[in-house]
Image (cartoon, helix red, strand yellow):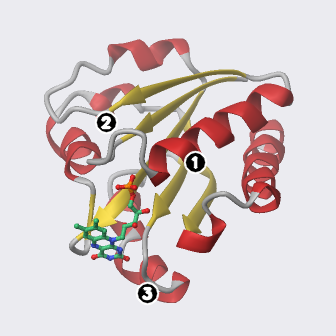
Amino acid sequence: MRAIILFDSKTAGGSTEKLIDSIGQELAKTGAYVEKAKCKTTGDYSFIEDFDVVIMGAPIYYLLVSSQLLGALLQSNLKKYLTGKKVAIFLTCGSPELMANLLYLPQLKMNLVNNTILAEKIFAPDQLSDLTIIEKFVNEVNAAYKEK
Ligand SMILES: Cc1cc2nc3c(=O)[nH]c(=O)nc-3n(C[C@H](O)[C@H](O)[C@H](O)COP(=O)(O)O)c2cc1C
């Protein structure tokens, strides 16, 4: 598997970036080639042609998925290059999982209606450095990738 983790966060080296590094390390342990890239609304996403899985994640700030990832999905060529890609999505936030599933995940999923979603996960603050939970997410991505 060649996976790219597309992310956004307003906090350099913050909880989302640390989580991404852990996800990347766990994926690499399974034999995957993994890179990460920080999103920009105005970015050129043609480079994702080189990857077969796109993992996308960002924090929630003031009820919205962090703006550069959401902006990239809405305004850049990201959606065009996501055509036919298998994706996995995750969010970091302080809200309870039920609320996050209802309010926040759809902000990403409404832009991915033509993609196969391998896995989706809300990471609560206490799960951000929980390796068992991170491993479970990675295993889910891997298993669904092989299956679908
Ligand atoms: C300014 C600010 C606004 C936030 N707004 C929300 C929110 O509306 N809903 C929520 O569930 N969490 C909210 N959070 C919590 C963050 O999503 C959570 O702490 C996340 O892990 C931060 O990621 P970061 O360290 O990469 O910035 C907010 C955090 C900050 C700092």
Q: Dividing the image into four equal quarters, which quarter contains ligand 1?
A: bottom left
Tell me the element at label 2.
helix
Tell me the element at label 3.
helix
Between label 3 and label 2, give the one nearer the viewer. 3
Q: x%, y% of residue 92?
A: 47, 63
Residue at screen point 60% across, 24% down: 52
**Which residue in the structure is indicated by mark 3?**
99
Residue at screen point 82% across, 37% down: 146
Residue at screen point 60% across, 60% down: 128
Give the quadrant of residue 77.
top left
As drawn, 135 above or below 142: below
Binning the other alpha carbons within 10 Å of mark 2 as few (below 14), some (14 to 19) or many (20 upward) gives some
In contact (CB < 8 Å): disc 1 and disc 2: no
Which quadrant of the figure contains the N terminus?
A: top right
**Residue type beneath disc 2:** Lys
Q: Which mark is residue 19?
A: 1
Q: x%, y% of residue 22?
A: 66, 41
Disc 1 beta carbon < 8 A from ligand 1? yes
As drawn, 97 above or below 24: below
Binning the other alpha carbons within 10 Å of mark 1 as few (below 14), some (14 to 19) or many (20 upward) gives many
Reading the chain from its start, which is encountered first: label 1 or label 2?
1
**Residue type beneath disc 1:** Leu
Disc 3 beta carbon < 8 A from ligand 1? yes
Tell me the distance, in whole angstroms, between the alpha carbons under discs 1 and 3. 21 Å
**Which residue in the structure is indicated by mark 2?**
79
